[in-house]
Image: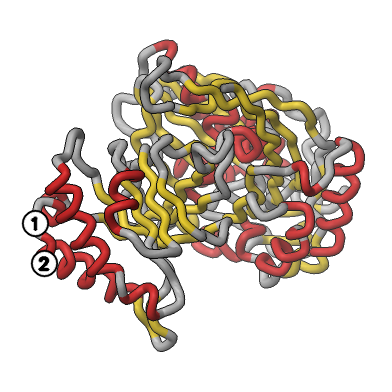
């Protein structure tokens, strides 16, 4: 079995808005007469849009109609129709995610996104997409080393740490090239609120500055980025618009109307002086959008159980059973599930959730039956709230577990590893109905530190 999906990636960033179209190839890697194992075996970018400045109506409002017009024109140029889009992502990144009407922009793009495209602005996912789009994960795997990837855009710097191709950690810092904007005479026309901790050396609105006047600000920014490098990590990879300026800065530093052309060289000098090996990503300014179009989606295992499910399912919070809870009898399991479920109740009742567990490698019929009874009893309140059970198992047992649970609607899928606190987007079945496209998202919470807002680090 070999099937191809069309994936679209749209990135609405602090500085630029871009779109890519990719073709994802799905193939069954299992031998004949065994359970199918469908995987994405190839990702090819078939169209790259022009790079557009993100249209704004003011410092706090995105021009939703302007963004929609950009996407509509790029769809036309790509020869792409909405009904051809099967998966992908629309993401609003960096400072743009904080604009007053960010959700309205996503709504304006709904006619292009289709039912299978996830919309998100989580900094954790941005870090991963940029790193994969730039090839940092492959670089780490091929050279069997640790690589810290920086995606430095207009409003934020997204970091992802890989070791031997495996993601270890992510972070996000409020450092970017368009936190300070200037006109062609060097007068400051915008200063981001996140620069407030450095207000003593951030020029005032209307003040005319020379490159040398910005040295204290650049020094503070690059110091924070240097301190973000974990001890023992010497290989640093870069993408984003500032990455281009690290290697090829424009002759006129005011070319882009921001401090990116100064920040890039300043960062390169500091890090090379610290003895770091710097690697330019295979994608720089397009890294995040390439990641969004080609790397957001994975596929479930091939033993799914699906009955009357209204796809797509978006932003499902994950409740994770511990191994001890999984081993309990039906009554104990039901109590554990009900306790977890109660955390997701508000004035309007329960919300739709996904319950995750490891599962057993070769469970007996008796064990599957007991597990199914416990899960069914614990998740029963979802039906009363107008929802239904979604069960995510790591091991290949979703079909038999779903059959044993009974009821409808009901979804059991396997081959997906998630943690408590993650969120899931699940698309309709593909590859002849044998697998589901899945996006795992992690939300990070923010706390203030000198030098801007920094998201809490979380091991992944």
Quadrant hosting residue 78:
top right
Q: x%, y% of residue 234?
A: 39, 21
Q: Nearer the viewer, residue 344 or 25?
A: 25
Quarter occupied by the N terminus: top right
- Can you identify the residue that label 2 sits on? 331
Q: Residue at x 23, y 56 (%)?
A: 372
- Residue at image x 70%, y 35%? 6
Q: Is residue 267 above or below residue 344?
A: above
Instruction: Give the residue furthest to the top.
Output: 143
| In the displayed structure image, the side of residue 104 where residue 97 appears, left or right | left
The residue closer to the viewer here, 293 or 4, is: 4
Label 1: element kind: loop
Q: Determine the secondary structure under disc 2.
A: helix
Q: Is residue 401 left or right of residue 118?
A: left
Q: Quote the CA–CA distance across marks 1 and 2.
A: 8 Å
Q: Is residue 114 visible?
A: yes
Q: Position of residue 294 (x, y in %)?
A: 62, 33
* Label 2 Cα crowd, 10 Å radius (few <14 / some 14-19 / many 20+): some
Q: Which mark is residue 10?
A: none
Indicate whether 249 appears above or below 405.
Answer: above
- Residue under circle 1? 328
- Looking at the image, residue 282 sits to the left or right of residue 446; the answer is right
Query: What quarter of the picture does the C terminus occupy?
Result: top left
Q: Are marks 1 and 2 in contact (CB under 8 Å)?
A: yes
């Amino acid at each position: 079995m070999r099937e191809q999906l069309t994936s679209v990636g749209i990135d609405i960033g602090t500085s630029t808005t871009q779109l890519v179209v990719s073709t994802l190839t799905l193939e069954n890697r299992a031998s004949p007469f065994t359970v199918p194992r469908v995987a994405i075996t190839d990702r090819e970018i078939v169209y790259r849009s022009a790079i557009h400045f993100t249209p704004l109506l003011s410092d706090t409002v995105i021009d939703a109609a302007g963004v929609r017009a950009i996407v509509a024109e790029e769809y036309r140029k790509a020869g792409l129709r909405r009904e051809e889009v099967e998966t992908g992502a629309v993401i609003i990144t960096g400072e743009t995610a904080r604009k007053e009407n960010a959700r309205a922009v996503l709504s304006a793009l709904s006619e292009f996104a289709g039912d299978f495209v996830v919309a998100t602005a989580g900094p954790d996912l941005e870090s991963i997409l940029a790193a994969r789009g730039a090839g940092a994960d492959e670089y780490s795997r091929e050279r069997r080393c640790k690589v810290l990837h920086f995606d430095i855009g207009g409003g934020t710097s997204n970091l992802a740490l890989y070791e031997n191709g495996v993601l270890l950690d992510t972070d996000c810092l409020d450092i970017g090239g368009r936190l300070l904007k200037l006109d062609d005479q060097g007068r400051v026309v915008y200063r981001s609120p996140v620069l407030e901790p450095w207000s003593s050396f951030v020029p005032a609105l209307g003040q005319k500055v020379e490159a040398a006047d910005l040295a204290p600000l650049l020094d503070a920014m690059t110091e924070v980025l240097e301190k973000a490098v974990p001890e023992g990590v010497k290989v640093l990879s870069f993408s984003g618009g500032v990455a281009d300026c690290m290697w090829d800065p424009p002759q006129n530093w005011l070319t882009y109307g921001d401090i990116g052309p100064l920040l890039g060289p300043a960062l390169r000098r500091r890090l090379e002086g610290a003895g770091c090996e710097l690697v330019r990503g295979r994608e720089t300014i397009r890294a995040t959008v390439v990641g969004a179009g080609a790397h957001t989606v994975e596929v479930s295992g091939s033993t799914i159980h699906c009955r009357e499910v209204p796809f797509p399912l978006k932003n499902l919070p994950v409740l994770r059973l511990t191994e001890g809870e999984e081993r309990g009898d039906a009554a104990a399991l039901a109590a554990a599930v009900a306790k977890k479920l109660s955390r997701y109740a508000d004035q309007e009742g329960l919300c739709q959730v996904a319950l995750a567990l490891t599962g057993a490698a070769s469970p007996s019929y008796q064990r599957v039956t007991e597990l199914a009874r416990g899960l069914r009893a614990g998740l029963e309140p979802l039906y009363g709230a107008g929802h239904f059970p979604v069960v995510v198992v790591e091991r290949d047992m979703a079909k038999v577990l779903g059959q044993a649970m009974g009821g409808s609607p009901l979804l059991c899928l396997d081959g997906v590893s998630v943690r408590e606190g993650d969120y899931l987007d699940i698309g309709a079945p593909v590859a002849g109905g044998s697998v589901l496209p899945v996006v795992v998202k992690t939300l990070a919470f923010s706390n203030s530190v000198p030098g801007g807002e920094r998201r809490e680090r979380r091991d992944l």
